[in-house]
Amino acid sequence: MRAKPKLGQNFLVDGQAAQRIVAALGEIAGRTVVEIGPGQGAITESLAARAKHVVAVELDRELAASLRGRFKAARVTVVEQDVLRFDFAAAAAEFGERLRVAGNLPYAITSSILLKLAASHAALDLAVLMVQREVAERITATAGTRDYGSFSIAMQMYGPIEQLFTLPPSAFSPPPKVYSTVFRWRFAPRFAELGVEEAGFLRFVRQIFAQKRKTLVNNLRAAGVATDAAAAALAAAGIDQQTRAEAVPIEGLAMLWCELEER
Ligand code: SAM
């Protein structure tokens, strides 16, 4: 069967890497694991040998049919569906547990999948995912580094993320043009701990990073916050008036949001 580039079909041919991905999920003997985009089953094989139950969500009809033929055991359920339409909350309710998630993601829709997982966080325990290396750099970036931005914060607000290992194009067939990085994401939202409201804080983060090279005050003004109010909130949060959002860690941005909300 020919790989379909539009579906991001770069199949993992490094068996050791597949095993490392599954090992990074921790103890799964008693757990249900959802695999996103199982493809030809490189990771599914190892998951099926270890997990209590695997739900493999594959959009490609031919691949889904071939996986069904290959994994006949009751503990592997192949769902032919767009993962962006998969209901993680319903699956968690059905299996009576928060789900673990694994996948070598189709790169063209990585951001949409990650945002969907963030929105489904209450149904999830942890995820081990492979993405384009540059995406992994962005989502794990910390303040003061080039890659730190609203997407880093939108992901990290749902729990700690750690990079695990990076693979060259030769680990896949056909080889993609980019390097790939595997990361682990433990779902533990930080909104309550930081005293911020989820939707309001994430909107604020997008606003203050709208023009990365501008100061916080200027981005806030563009979002309709009066300069006086922005200056007072920055002072109360202990942030210098000339600071750009990219220099401030999540905790400082949460303090600033709280100060602005009070005004
Ligand atoms: N897991 C396999 C591996 O590592 O060899 C395949 C990974 S390949 C990078 C991405 C897989 O996601 C492909 O099998 C592709 O058909 C599937 N896919 C693409 N878009 C999808 C979608 N929206 N929902 C579910 N699966 C999708």
Image (tube, rainbow, N blue to C red):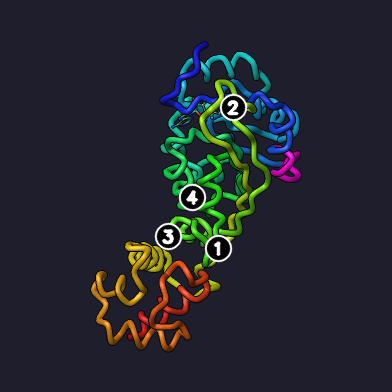
Q: Quadrant of residue 14?
A: top right
Residue 150 got which mark? 3
Category of crowding for the residue at label 2, using alpha-carbon neighbours closer than 10 angstroms: few (below 14), some (14–19), many (at least 20): some
Residue at which label 4 appears: 120
Quadrant housing residue 218: bottom left
Q: Amino acid at mark 4?
A: Ser
Say what amino acid the circle numbered 2 marks. Answer: Thr
Closer to the camera, 133 or 205?
133
Query: Is residue 27 rendered to the left or right of residue 197?
Result: right
Residue at (33% x, 62% y) in the render:
210
Residue 28 falls within the magenta-colored stretch: yes
88 lies above or below 210: above
- Tag 4, which secondary structure? loop
Badge 1 marks a residue whose secondary structure is loop
The magenta segment is 22-30
Write down the residue under mark 1. Answer: 142
What secondary structure is the magenta-colored segment mainly?
A: loop
Where residue 191 sits: x, y (%)? 50, 68
Mark 4 or mark 1: whose residue is earlier in sequence: 4
